[in-house]
Amino acid sequence: MLQEARGALEGLLGLGRDAGDIEAGQMALRAVVVYAFTLGVVRVGSRRFLGKATAFDVILGIMIGSVMSRGINGSAGLVPTLAAGAVLVALHGLFAMLAFRTSWFGDWVKGRPVLLVEDGRVRPEGMRQASLTENDLAEALRLQGREPDPSRIRRAYLERNGSVSVVPREGAPRVVEVAVADGVQTVRVELS
């Protein structure tokens, strides 16, 4: 009975065949198996991979895609491919845990934010370190939808995930005085 089930599985998935000998239906079924397995492993093993990605997370995505595709097209065995994918996700989880517990490891694996603007002044060393031009910074500030003028920003960082975050400058409200008409009382309006 077990031998018959194994034989049926080998026939359905084209196990033990060379890559060129796998039929379209077998490859399609392999794709379903690999997709379901990969989805399950990533959901269980690495929830942070599904969030906003840092280079640390992108590398896992690239590697797991590369490894798992080999199991679909038959250039590597299906079971070893699934095992390699599980190991990659487990390693990612282990590195994430170590990064959480050890700041130096977290900085090494995930990187550090780079200060681009401080108290309204663009920091050339931060811009150089991040390989950003003034035009890149202006674009990022516009895309933030906040303050496009660096002189009105307290701090701006290139974050570990590649986005620019902005801490606006807290200024006193502007007071505008408006004279109403011929000797009538002046109106003061605070704009913040």
Image: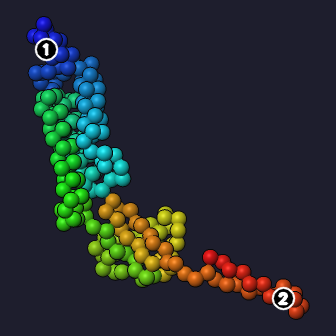
Which residue corresponds to the image point at 45% horizontal and 72% vertical from the top-left?
A: 167
Element class at badge 1: helix
Residue 76 picture quarter? top left
Location of residue 155 with respect to 95 vertically, above or below: below
Location of residue 12 with respect to 69 vertically, above or below: above
Element class at badge 2: loop
Task: Give, as a three-letter code, the residue at label 2.
Answer: Gln
Q: Report the front residue among 94 and 141.
A: 94
Classify mark 2: residues with Cα within 10 Å, few (<14), some (14-19) or many (20+).
Answer: few
Q: In the rendered view of the protein, which quadrant contains the C terminus? A: bottom right
Outermost right residue = 182
Q: Distance of mark 1 from mark 2, alpha carbons?
A: 94 Å
> Which residue matches tag 2?
185
Q: Where does the image place residue 124, in percent across and percent down from the top left?
A: 34, 81
Which residue corresponds to the image point at 27% horizontal and 51% vertical from the top-left?
A: 57
> Which residue matches tag 1?
6
Task: Give, as a three-letter code, the residue at label 1.
Answer: Arg
Q: Report the front residue among 168 and 151.
A: 168
Residue 187 picture quarter? bottom right
Left or right: 158 in relation to 83? right
